[in-house]
Image: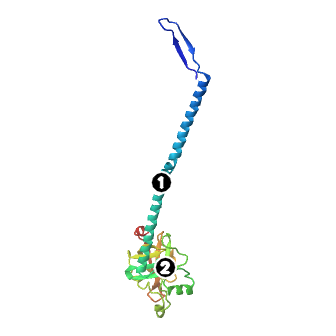
Amino acid sequence: MRPKGIIYKHGKSPTKGEMRIFLPFLTRVLYRSMQGVGAGLVAVVIILFVTSFTPIIEQEINFRLNKEENAVVKNQMLINVAEADKIIEVQREAESYGVGSYFSVVVPKIDAASNIIVNVDTSDKEEYLDALKKGVAHAKGTYFPGQGENIFLFAHSTDSPINFSRYNAVFYLLRKLESGDKLVLYFADRKYVYEVEDKFTTSIDDTAWITEGASGERLLLMTCDPPGTTWRRLIISAKPSLSNVETN
């Protein structure tokens, strides 16, 4: 510390001078010590302030973070609950038709409903005849609802009218369907609705219709025609309905 000042002579004399004033050594030591103590006290106050308010600040931050996280969790829970409710609704609807929601078909117009046996080999007569005693068969190598490709189901494939009662006759009235009629598939606890777009008969040797037609997902139903014979095949072709946007 080196105080400095201008010393003026008393009176009117223009004479003036300058001098430096030095504090005594002990005074300077005391001053420096007071500076250090003051700085230390300021640091202590800052530390005490930080340590005192840090838990509060942490609590505020955690609250905000948890609030956002909880909001995400709650939204996810709501989505899960809504999805669960939707699944239960589909299961109950399928049960009302007497079928399960794992994989089944319902044709409301002709009051037909059946569970579907998956991946049945159409080239293995013993296998597909056994499947047709239990329900509608899903042809092995074709696809499932929602996959954007052909879904091929067949039923009531008897070798004579005598065996008619031995096999599932769920597609017996399939010939009554017309363009625009609804078909419903339940698959993996979801509901898929289709609309009939074409109906035709073909020879038993004709398989071209499986790959012909518009691209995209199609539901193909096949049965014998006339019913109880193996003379010809009746084919129903259906496309996904716009209502699938609501049901899925």
Q: Which residue, given by chain and number where applicable, does mark 1 sit on?
A: 63
- Local SS, label 2: strand
Residue flagged by tag 1: what amino acid is it?
A: Phe
Mark 2 or 1, nearer chain start: 1
Observer-nearest residue: 217 or 111? 111
Which mark, by number, is residue 153? 2
- Local SS, label 1: helix
Q: Nearer the viewer, mark 2 or mark 1?
A: 1
- The crowding category of the residue bearing disc 2, from other C-alpha atoms within 10 Å (few below 14, some 14 to 19, many at least 20), is many
Residue drawn at (57%, 30%) of the image: 34
35 lies left or right of 172: right
Q: Residue furthest bottom?
A: 162
Q: Are marks 2 and 1 in contact (CB under 8 Å)?
A: no
Picture quarter with the N terminus = top right
Residue drawn at (49%, 51%) of the image: 61
Residue drawn at (49%, 79%) of the image: 153
Observer-nearest residue: 234 or 6? 6
Q: Position of residue 21 (x, y in %)?
A: 57, 17
Q: Residue furthest top?
A: 13
Q: Residue furthest front?
A: 26
Alpha carbons under labels 2 and 1: distance apart: 56 Å
Q: Position of residue 199 (x, y in %)?
A: 42, 78
Q: Is residue 146 above or below residue 206?
A: above
Q: Position of residue 137 (x, y in %)?
A: 50, 81
Q: Is residue 216 above or below residue 58?
A: below
